[in-house]
Image (cartoon, rainbow, N blue to C red):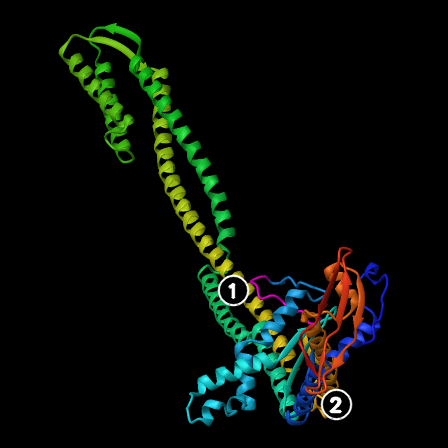
Amino acid sequence: MNLSSISGIGNQSLSVTLRGVVAVFFRHKRTMALCFLGIFTGAILCALLLPPSYRAETKILVKKERVDPVVSPEQSAPMVMKDSVSEEELNSEVELMSSEDVLRKVVVENGLDQTKSLLSKLGIHQSDEIRIAKAIRRLKSELSIEVVKKSNLISVGYESKNPKLAATVLSSLNAAYIQKHLEVHHPTGQAKFFDIETERYRKALEETEDELKAFDTTQGGVAPAAMRDLVLGKLNDFSADLHSTQAEIKATQTRIANLERQEGTTDQRLTTQMRKGDDPQVLQQLKGTLVTLELKRTELLTKFQPTYPLVVEIDKEIADTKATLAKEEGTPLHEETTDQNPTYGWINAELAKAKADLSGLQAKETALQATVSLYENNAKQLDEKGITQQDLLRTQKANEQNYLLYLKKGEEARIADALDQSNILNVTVTQAPYVPALPSRSPVLLAVVGLVLAGVVSVGVGFGLDYMDQSFRTPSEVTGELGIPVLAAVPHHVTADTGMVYGNDFVGGDGNGFGRTHEEEPVRLS
């Protein structure tokens, strides 16, 4: 047996060397080789047996070039302008693209629900809705929809064994998504709604105009408001005349009361001469006077009523004359000469005039009151008619404004529909899906990946087994684990009868004696 004396090796620290790494490969070369061959063979089989998969891609640009007016009751609706597309808007379009109804259209159009499943092969029948729901879920998991970083692009990818089907599915997805975008952002039926409302307000406007024409015809073409102002002016004038007449009536009544009081205190006649004795001339004169008074009374009765003051006065004078005549005839001659009191006559004349004026003023007051009442009623009626006319005018103006508003909104809706029909939208397909010519999984690439994976895994397995091995293989391991110096090392030896290799034997000492350790587990040579 050859002994190798290793002096001072216990003082060296345990370190990883190239020799130790190579030794690991030699110790576990069989296991590592089997692991490498197994993984690489599996990768080769996958590359040969798996069918090729083709990936189609499309890209959609979200932009802000078209701004539609906001539907509002205002004539000029505010238009919100944004230069950039926000992250929320991009995410909304992504969710809109992957919505249930959009994917349902794609599934139905491309017959993805007709794919035979394991259950159908086993004879288990499924309803159409279940098959469509499963196809939608499968399509949603196979679709790759993501926003390209730092851009307004949405990238959509889909893999299939059939390259034409991959491109067709993405084309159907683009069409269904654009239609859904139109339904969400531009609901249909706006133009029809505005046309109906425009026609309704046009008829309402015509009816209001006809009512205004009929109203003007009944008023003779004169505006009630202007006519009311004229009537109010006349009413003010007549009211002033009425107040003035009422004041004159009060003044006349006061004057009549004063004249009547003065008349009561003033004698009607004054004695101008008195003489006693029988005087036939006096009697003759009294009779002549009596005749004159009676004639005068007859004349006054042709003009005035018996109650008129002059007539009453004449009656009184006649009575006085008769009494005087009777007295003269029954008594001795007593001559007395009288004459009418001029003051009493003036008072009587002024009283008669005042009473006549009072009657005229009272008649005027009655007429003015009737006129004022008439004008007041006319003013009230004209005011009510003016309110009615103003209501008609306001209704006409409101109907006209609504008619013009809906006419404008209808035109805006038709413009939006025309833009929709021309596909002038805020989303555009920048990259149309095309039929891929090359598969997305290359067999060579899969073989290379399998080769790299087999190498990494086999090396890892070898180092893992070596790490879990508890035996000593080098003097440095003995020194590191036991903390004693190694005096000698016996190399591997092979038994002739069994062909087994036994580990090293190490001899060492701790200063007080000698110790020996060795590896007992046999290893078969390859």
User: In this rendering, does residue 278 appear at all?
Assistant: yes
- Asked if residue 342 is positioned above or below residue 173 in the image, the reply reads above
Q: Which mark is first along the chain, 1 or 2?
A: 1
* Element at label 2: helix
Q: Quadrant of the N terminus?
A: bottom right
Dominant secondary structure, magenta? loop
How many labels, in total? 2
Q: Which residues are magenta?
A: 65-74
Inspect the image, locate mark 2, and give the three-letter code of the amino acid beneath it: Val
The mark found on residue 444 in the picture is: 2
Q: Quadrant of residue 157?
A: bottom right
Q: Is residue 71 magenta?
A: yes
Residue drawn at point x = 67 percent, y = 94 percent? 48
Residue 368, position in %: x, y? 40, 40
Q: Is residue 47 magenta?
A: no
Q: Nearer the viewer, residue 450 or 256?
A: 450
State the residue position of label 1: 399
Q: Nearer the viewer, residue 274 or 488?
A: 488
Residue drawn at point x = 51 percent, y = 62 percent? 396
